[in-house]
Amino acid sequence: MERSDLLEIVRRPLSPDTRLEEPTSWEEYKRVDEILERDEAKYPQLWYDSVRGVAIVVAPPTPLHSGMAGVLLASISDEVKMNSGISSEVTRNLRSDSDSRSVGYTSRGLTTRAWDGALQYREGVRLTLMIAVEVGVSQSYDSLRAAISWSVCALRCRLGLAMSISEGSRGETPRMRYYASIEEANAAAGEAEEDFNRQLTQHPYGPLVRFGVTWFGRVRHVVLESYRQRDEESMPETLLEPSQSFVSD
C-alpha cells in the first residue's frame, strides 16, 4: 500500500481544538475516512473541502470550546422562548443540534463538514436550519469564515454566528501516549474531560492543565461575528464577509 500523508496525520496525537489541513484527493479522503470509521473512535474527525482540495483533520474540542457553542445556543433559545411576540407553537418546534455532519455539492465536487452547534425548526418531518454556530479556538480566521459560510450558503442557514477565541501560550507539547485499545484511549479521554470540566468551574477562562502540561491557555480575547446570505443564488462555496462584528478583550 502506498504511503499516505493523510493517514499519518490522523494517527498523530493532536492537541485539543487543533485543526490541520492537508491537500489531498476526494478518493484518498474517503479511504482514510473509512479507516477511521472502522476504528470506531469519535476523534479525530475528518472533513473535506472540495473547493480548496484539502482534508481537514479535527482534534477533540476542549470543554471550553464545546461549552461556548452550547451556551451561545442556549442563550438564543431562551431569548426566543421569553419573547412574547413568538407563539408557543414555534418555540416548541425549535431543536438544538450539535456536531452534525453535512455533505453537499460545490462546483468542484463534494464537501463534508460539521457545525459546532445549530438551532433548527421542525415542521412535520422537515427541518429548517435557522442558526448555525462555529467556534474557533486559536483557529485561522479564513478557516473559520469558510466553515460558517458553508452553513449559510450551502446549507441555506438563515443566520451564521462565528466565535473566534484567542488563547495564551500552551507551552510545551504534550508527550505521545500509547493505549492498548480504542476503549482504553476513549476512557482516558473521558477522564481528562471530567478533569477539565472541574477546572473550568474554578477558572472558566483557563488555563486547563493536566499532569503538568497546559492543554489550553488562558483566554485573551473573543470575537463574535454574524453572517447572512445576501444573495439567494450564492454558490455553496461562497466566502462571506461578516454582517456584524463584536470584540471582547
Image: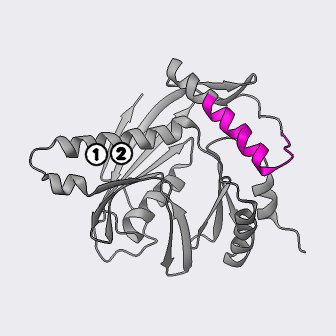
Up the image or down, 217 lies above or below 126; here it is: above
Magenta highlight range? 177-194
Q: Which residue is drawn at 72% across and 70% down?
A: 34
Query: x%, y% of residue 106?
Result: 49, 78
Q: Which image quarter holds the C terminus?
A: top left
Disc 1: CA contacts within 10 A as few (<14), some (14-19) or many (>=20): some
Q: Is residue 168 visible?
A: no
Rendered residue at 76%/48% (across/down): 183
Pointer 2 local density, CA inside 10 Å: few below 14, some 14–19, many at least 20: many
Residue 163 quadrant = top left
Secondary structure at numbered mark 2: helix
Q: Is residue 43 in the magenta section?
A: no
Q: Name the residue under label 2.
A: 73
Contact check, label 2 and label 1, Cβ < 8 Å: yes
Q: Look at the numbered disc 1 and give the secondary structure of its residue.
A: helix
Question: Which residue sits at x=34%, y=42%?
Answer: 74
Instruction: Look at mark 1 in the image and give the residue it sits on.
Output: 77
In the picture provided, is 123 more to the left or to the right than 163?
Answer: left
- Looking at the rendered image, the quarter that the N terminus falls into is bottom right
Q: Which amino acid does label 2 sit on?
A: Leu
| Above-or-below relation of 82 to 216 | below
Amino acid residing under circle 1: Ser
Q: Quick one: 168 or 118, which is closer to the camera?
A: 118
Any mark on residue 143, and which?
A: none
